[in-house]
Image (cartoon, rainbow, N blue to C red):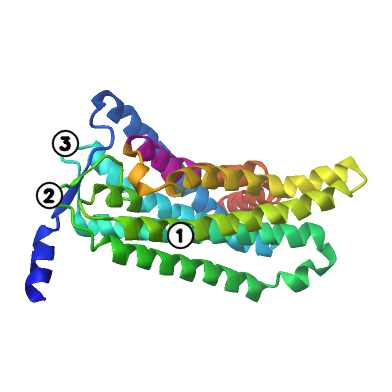
Amino acid sequence: MRGDNQSFLEDLPKDFILLGVSDRPWLERPLFVVLLVSYILAMLGNIAIILVSRLDPQLHSPMYIFLRHLSFLDLCYTTTTVPQMLVNMGSSRKTISYGGCTTQYAIFHWLGCTECIVLAAMALDRYVAICEPLRYAVIMHRSLCLQLVAVAWLSGFGNSLVQVVLTVQLPFCGRHVLNNFFCEVPAMIKLSCADTAMNDATLAVLVAFFVLVPLALILLSYGFITRAVLRIHTSKGRHKAFGTCSSHLVVVSLFYLPAIYMYLQPPSSYSQEQGKFISLFYSIITPTLNPFIYTLRNKDVKGALRRLLKGQNREAHGN
């Protein structure tokens, strides 16, 4: 047994090479600039959402509890992957250690599954707000919201733990070149030289559960919401009701469409060339756009930002 374990550890690569766009060197510098700017915007935008929703008393409703956690998830998403990508694009040595790679896909998988459930909880909140407005405060009380958030984080962690335990057992037989910008479970399964049927099946079942079940709940919620909104007689009332949901629908689309393409296909048919650019989209572009979508399309958030900035200006002039 000890000999087998020692042999397994010796077969593990010390690091992985992340190709990124090294086959297109002319693309590295502009992509570096895009990633750097996007990362700065994602950090500023999501931190602003978290601070505003905590500091403004008018944004202490259940919807903004979920929005704070969504922004925190997006901060973690970008920080898990983008700094490593920037380092690799800025140097000729495009490597990541085996431990760093494992940590990266473990956290990334955890955050992705957690976000699926948080988005479903936000859809439930919108359903109760529009379909049961008189009972909204009773149903969506603070403790329920915190319980839903806790379920999201814990179930996402459990799913990630299962995937990590299965993935770290895969041998790579000296293969350590990943045609990707960062480490992901499908890419690791694709790289392995062993029979990955168990990994394929487990990944498909768990990801289908964490992607399709929340998505089904979101679509069901919006089916009821649409039916309720169409019963509103005034166009102003319908417009207001749809306006409260539009930002969430845009965010759901940006998150779920690439996730479905990436994870709801067998890793054996996974195309690393296509997959790496889709991964780039939902690891940096989506977290960058989310705070702007909620800010530009949400009067409450814009009003809170104005009040916060006015308060800061008054304090500055007062001093």
* Distance from Cα at disc 3 to Cα at disc 1: 39 Å
The residue identified by callout 1 is 205
Q: How many marks?
A: 3
Query: What is the three-letter code of the residue carrying label 3?
Result: Ser
Q: Residues within 10 Å of mark 1 (few under 14, many from 20)?
A: few
Three-letter amino acid code of the residue under disc 2: Gly
What residue range appears in magenta?
273-287
Q: CA distance from mark 2 to mark 1?
A: 29 Å
**Quarter of the image containing the C terminus?**
bottom right
**Which residue is more in the foreground, 225 or 213?**
213
Which one is in front in this view, the residue at disc 3 or the one at disc 1? 1
Give the labeled residue for mark 3. Answer: 92
- Disc 2/disc 3 C-alpha distance (Å): 21 Å
Task: Name the element at disc 1.
Answer: helix
Visible residue check, residue 179: yes
Q: Which mark is residue 174?
A: 2
Q: Amino acid at mark 1?
A: Val
